[in-house]
């Protein structure tokens, strides 16, 4: 049996309720909210396909039937496999753990579906692939500078060392970098997590303390589509791009 190409599998986290995006999510999942003419999940799947992802595991919960129908109707890469979370929302860590049998043991991309961005240099997914070094890291996050973001109202997540190592903001009032919803991970990081809902931030914090959490900074602008105002701002900004 031919071994899959490195980093050809992704986990796409699409099971969120999308409550902050109401009324757009009253009758559809957040993944199907459109920005600049395309559903959020299609924006992300297209990015992943360009990075060489041929197989994407997508978790579903809210309006699951509608999302599954949309994904089944797609003809573009990548191939879609559903991880069914209709019974309960499992958050990011729990969703990844439930999908473990579908993902295998090789490193994978993990992506949220509420992020869009404008790239000015090397595509961030390609930059992650180029920087990935499993001997030094267990997780490699895509990060954005706060002064080049739209729709992200938090005080930042991380400080980065010269070698790309990350530390959480914790007691600091602000940090210069925010997580932009895309990363590479060894899926084994969730194997010891609870069987129910938990956040990926839990293992990330342990890995940061062990010097195994790293990051790459986007050369461009990131838009977090988390609420109606951010959606409008993202549409306006994307509309300015040729």
Image: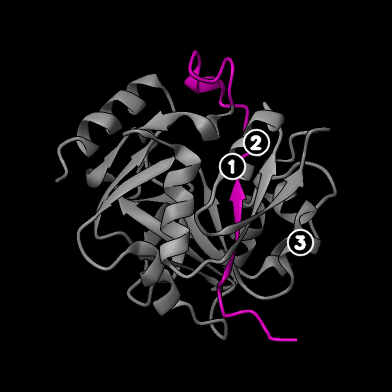
Q: Secondary structure at mark 3?
A: helix
Residue behind mark 1: 73
Q: Residue at x 41, y 64 (%)?
A: 50
Q: Secondary structure at mark 2?
A: helix
Q: Position of residue 69 (x, y in %)?
A: 65, 36
Dominant secondary structure of the residues highlighted in magenta in the image: loop
Question: Which label is found at residue 69?
Answer: 2
- Image quadrant of residue 25? top right
**Which residues are the magenta region?**
1-28
Q: Position of residue 163 (x, y in %)?
A: 37, 77
Cα–Cα gap, marks 2 and 1: 6 Å
Q: Earlier in the sequence, mark 2 or mark 3?
A: 2
Q: Earlier in the sequence, mark 3 or mark 1?
A: 1
Q: Is residue 44 left or right of residue 123?
A: right
The answer to whether mark 2 and mark 1 are in CB contact below 8 A is yes
Residue behind mark 3: 102
Cα–Cα gap, marks 2 and 3: 20 Å
240 up-or-down from 191: above or below: above
Q: Residue at x 15, y 38 (%)?
A: 240
Residue closer to the observer: 32 or 201:
32
């Amino acid at each position: 049996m031919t071994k899959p190409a490195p980093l050809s599998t992704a986990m796409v986290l699409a099971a969120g309720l999308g409550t902050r995006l109401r009324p757009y999510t009253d009758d559809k999942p957040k993944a199907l909210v459109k920005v600049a003419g395309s559903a959020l999940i299609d924006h992300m799947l297209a990015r992943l396909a360009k990075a060489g992802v041929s197989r994407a595991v997508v978790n579903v919960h809210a309006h699951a039937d509608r999302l599954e129908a949309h994904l089944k109707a797609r003809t573009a890469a990548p191939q879609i496999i559903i991880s069914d979370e209709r019974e309960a929302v499992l958050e990011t860590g729990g969703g990844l753990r439930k999908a473990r049998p579908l993902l295998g043991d090789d490193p994978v991309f993990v992506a949220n579906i509420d992020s869009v961005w404008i790239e000015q240099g090397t595509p961030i997914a390609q930059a992650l692939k180029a920087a990935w070094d499993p001997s030094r890291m267990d997780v490699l996050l895509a990060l954005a500078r706060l002064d080049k973001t739209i729709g992200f109202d938090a005080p930042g997540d991380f400080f980065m060392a010269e070698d790309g190592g990350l530390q959480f903001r914790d007691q600091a009032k602000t940090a210069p970098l925010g997580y932009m919803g895309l990363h590479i991970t060894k899926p084994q990081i969730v194997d010891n997590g609870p069987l129910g809902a938990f956040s990926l931030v839990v293992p990330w914090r342990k890995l940061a303390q062990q010097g195994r959490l790293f990051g790459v900074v986007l050369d461009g602008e990131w838009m977090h589509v988390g609420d109606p105002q951010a959606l409008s701002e993202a549409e306006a900004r994307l509309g300015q791009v040729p």
